[in-house]
């Protein structure tokens, strides 16, 4: 991609700057410092993007008509400011608005490449950031809302390490765009959401919005299936034309992304069925599950099928059926081993034939194998953040026009781009996240739903990719950490009250 002269050095420095600002938004010791960091991050990130794409054809309208571009920016800022005034009075609306905006992507051409970007969500994040920052910068110093825990520290480490490792990538642009479009705004979103008061009412409202959106998307998906046509995705249209099966994507570009969204809602509905004592709620959630399961079948997303099993399995374990879940997992493993033993020829022929394996995995086996080879060549620090696409093409001798994005397996992508250093931070983040979300989650249906949904999402990333590039991961982590902190505070208050009551009783006696 053509870049402005001298831009790569500025981009590398800018990438580290915006990453440090995002880390400060997550870890700042005071509300005022955090407000400064959030404001600076949301100003620096677009500036960094402008440096990255300034010399490209996509940015030519801005260069040719700067006054029109400035007017458009002012209109957008006015809308963001109006939304921020509402969020100042009602901060919890931020969570509902983020949930409502999260699934919607708009196709935009950036640097010669068309990408489906979360423009509505970016507007919500900007409004939330403005509502958070302005009162804390203009008014008296406010007390710290909560101290950052292990999850925040490791999220910050992930973002900063990613930016630092962009410094030695052959092309810094992919990492810059990942930082600008995903890591930095989603870190700000996490910092805002984790400080909300996640009451039962707020959790229920967010889940209801998710469910309503899922029903709308399912209706569109069913219509696509009935009419034999899909929206947006030319590759999917071609695939449906030449294959015996038919996949739908609803309003999502990719059937797997559509499937991931459905899985999250299915897990939340499953939690309601498992924990509710209301017959009416159980019947409503059961009906929702039937509709969404039918919608999931139309995606033919294997990664989503596996993810929903993981999510429901975690729910069952948190509900107290650990032995049943462990037994089912053991039976599945035994069945897989028995299949291999009973038909070794069939299995070996499928795995030894590169063409068959490539077709069975939609080309992902080649990407995984290539990622492993790249890791083997640079196992410590990798090839640099965002380097997978370029280095895989170089490794395989492919042209620039070849369709390559990522390995579709997050650990492989991390290993190839960031080496052992990135893998250590990635593994530590998952360990801290599951420790925070699962500990004591069985006592709360809301916490159980969030933990199970996050587990399902993590599994999906192992087969399809997009972990920290997915706002759902950050939002689930923020809600889960906040709910865990709320439960811990309630437990501590109950223990203090019990101790005080015991002392009072002893004194009376």
Image (cartoon, helix red, strand yellow):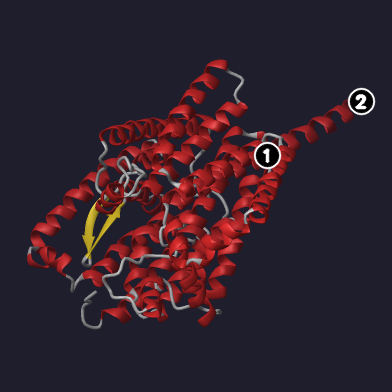
Tell me the quarter of the picture where residue 498 sits.
top right
Task: Specify the quadrant that holds the N terminus.
Answer: bottom left
Residue 36 visible in image: no
Contact? badges 1 and 2 (CB < 8 Å): no
User: For residue 32, which quarter of the picture?
Assistant: bottom left
Q: Nearer the viewer, residue 62 or 367?
A: 367
Residue at x 45% of width, y 78% of height: 383
In three-dimensional space, the C-alpha distance between marks 1 and 2, rounded to whole angstroms, equals: 44 Å
Q: Residues within 10 Å of mark 2 (few under 14, many from 20)?
A: few
Q: Is residue 450 left or right of residue 228?
A: right
Q: In this orientation, which residue lies closer to the viewer: 240 or 312?
A: 240
Mark 1 element type:
helix
Residue 98: percent from left, percent from top: 38, 43
* Element at label 2: loop
Residue in view at x 84 percent, y 31 percent: 502
Residue 505 percent coordinates (x, y): 86, 27
Against 170, is 129 above or below? above
- Residue 345 at x, y percent in the picture: 59, 60
Label 2 sits on residue:
509
Number of the label disc, if any, that sits on residue 317? 1
Q: Nearer the viewer, residue 49 or 37?
A: 49
- Mark 1 or mark 2, which has the lower sequence index? 1
């Amino acid at each position: 991609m053509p870049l402005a002269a001298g831009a790569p050095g500025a981009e590398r420095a800018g990438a580290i700057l915006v990453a440090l600002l995002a880390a400060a938004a997550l870890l700042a010791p005071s509300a005022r410092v955090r407000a400064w960091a959030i404001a600076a991050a949301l100003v620096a990130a677009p500036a960094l993007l402008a440096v990255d794409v300034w010399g490209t054809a996509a940015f030519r309208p801005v260069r040719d008509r700067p006054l029109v571009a400035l007017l458009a920016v002012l209109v957008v800022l006015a809308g963001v400011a109006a939304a921020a005034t509402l969020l100042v009075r009602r901060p919890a609306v931020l969570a509902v608005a983020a949930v409502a905006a999260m699934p919607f992507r708009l196709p935009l051409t950036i640097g010669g490449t068309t990408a489906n970007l979360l423009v509505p969500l970016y507007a919500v994040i900007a409004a939330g950031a403005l509502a958070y920052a302005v009162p804390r910068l203009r008014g008296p110093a406010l007390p710290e809302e909560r101290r950052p825990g292990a999850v925040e520290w490791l999220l910050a480490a992930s973002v900063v390490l990613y930016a630092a490792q962009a410094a030695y990538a052959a092309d810094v642009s992919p990492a810059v765009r990942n930082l600008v479009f995903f890591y930095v705004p989603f870190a700000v979103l996490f910092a805002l959401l984790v400080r909300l008061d996640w009451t039962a009412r707020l959790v229920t409202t967010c889940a209801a919005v998710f469910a309503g959106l899922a029903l709308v998307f399912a209706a569109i998906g069913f219509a696509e299936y009935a009419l034999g046509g899909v929206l947006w995705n030319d590759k999917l249209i071609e695939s449906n034309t030449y294959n015996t099966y038919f996949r739908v994507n609803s309003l999502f570009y990719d059937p797997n992304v559509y499937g991931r969204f459905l899985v999250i809602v299915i897990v939340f509905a499953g939690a309601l069925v498992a924990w509710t004592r209301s017959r009416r709620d159980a019947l409503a959630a059961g009906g929702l599950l039937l509709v969404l399961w039918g919608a999931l079948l139309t995606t033919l997303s294997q990664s989503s099928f596996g993810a929903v099993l993981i999510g429901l399995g975690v729910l069952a374990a948190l509900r107290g059926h650990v032995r049943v879940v462990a037994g089912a997992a053991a039976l599945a493993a035994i069945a897989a081993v028995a299949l291999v033993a009973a038909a070794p020829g069939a299995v070996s022929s499928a795995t030894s034939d590169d063409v068959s394996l490539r077709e069975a995995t939609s080309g992902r086996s080649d990407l995984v194998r290539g990622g492993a080879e790249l890791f083997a060549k640079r196992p410590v620090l990798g090839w640099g953040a965002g380097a997978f696409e370029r280095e895989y093409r170089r490794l395989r001798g492919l042209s620039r026009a070849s369709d390559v994005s990522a390995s579709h397996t997050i650990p492989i992508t991390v290993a190839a781009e960031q080496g052992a250093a990135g893998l250590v931070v990635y593994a530590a983040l998952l360990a801290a996240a599951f420790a925070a979300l699962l500990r004591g989650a069985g006592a709360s249906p809301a916490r159980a739903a969030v933990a199970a949904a996050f587990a399902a999402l993590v599994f999906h990333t192992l087969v399809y990719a997009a972990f920290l590039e997915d706002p759902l991961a950050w939002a689930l982590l923020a809600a889960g950490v906040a709910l865990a902190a709320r439960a811990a505070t309630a437990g501590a208050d109950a223990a203090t009250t019990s101790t005080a009551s015991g002392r009072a009783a002893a004194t009376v006696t």
